Image: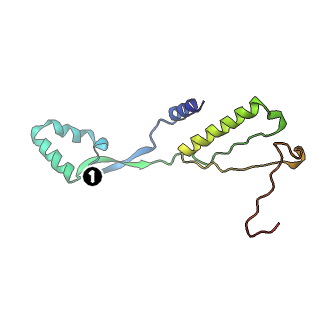
Amino acid sequence: MKLSALAIRKKVFERSSEELLEVEQGDAIHRLLPHELLSLHHPVLRKDFYRRFLDQELIQYSLRGVEEKGKGPMIVCLDGSSSMSGDKEIWSKAVTLTLLEIARKQRRLFPPRFAFHPRNTAPGSRHESPRPLRSRDEKP
């Protein structure tokens, strides 16, 4: 499941996150204009190409990064009611852990939020609300 989710994620967003902005001087071979690469085929111009490469004077495309959308925090609601007991509960927790791992790989926020409703839980059950945490300085 985890591998298929990662594969779909990569498949959907294969396009580059940069766009052409203008032309500038530099030495990035992967961004050179085509006519600069043609000079490598001519014996005299090849030496000029190497000189301009060392001096970072080759004409190349300037790229501007485009802000990727959809990289905000991930929010997951996990139902812990009695209707989710058994296989459904295991499945939902596995999905949540998989999403947590994907969020960490993408360096996205996955803020933990817990919500318990004390009316629906019996004392001593596994769904019982935990006692609120107190700081060390706070007295009971």
Seen at 42% across and 44% down, the residue is 19
Residue for badge 1: 25
Seen at 66% across and 35% down, the residue is 95
Q: Amino acid at mark 1?
A: Gln
Q: Give the image location of residue 51, x and y in percent.
A: 16, 50
Looking at this view, is 68 or 122 the one in front? 122
Residue 34 is left or right of residue 47, and the answer is right
**Crowding at mark 1 (Cα within 10 Å: few <14, some 14-19, many 20+):** some
Residue 38 is left or right of residue 15, and the answer is left
Under circle 1, the secondary element is strand
Seen at 84% across and 36% down, the residue is 82
**Residue 128 to residue 82: above or below:** below
Q: As drawn, which residue projects farthest toward the front? A: 124
Looking at this view, is 79 or 23 the one in front? 79
Residue 75 is left or right of residue 105, and the answer is right
Q: Quadrant of the C terminus?
A: bottom right
Residue 50 is left or right of residue 65, and the answer is left
Coloring applied to the structure: rainbow
Q: Give the image location of residue 20, x and y in percent.
A: 39, 45
Q: Give the image location of residue 116, x and y in percent.
A: 81, 48
Q: As drawn, which residue projects farthest toward the left? A: 44
Seen at 72% across and 33% down, the residue is 90
Q: How many marks?
A: 1
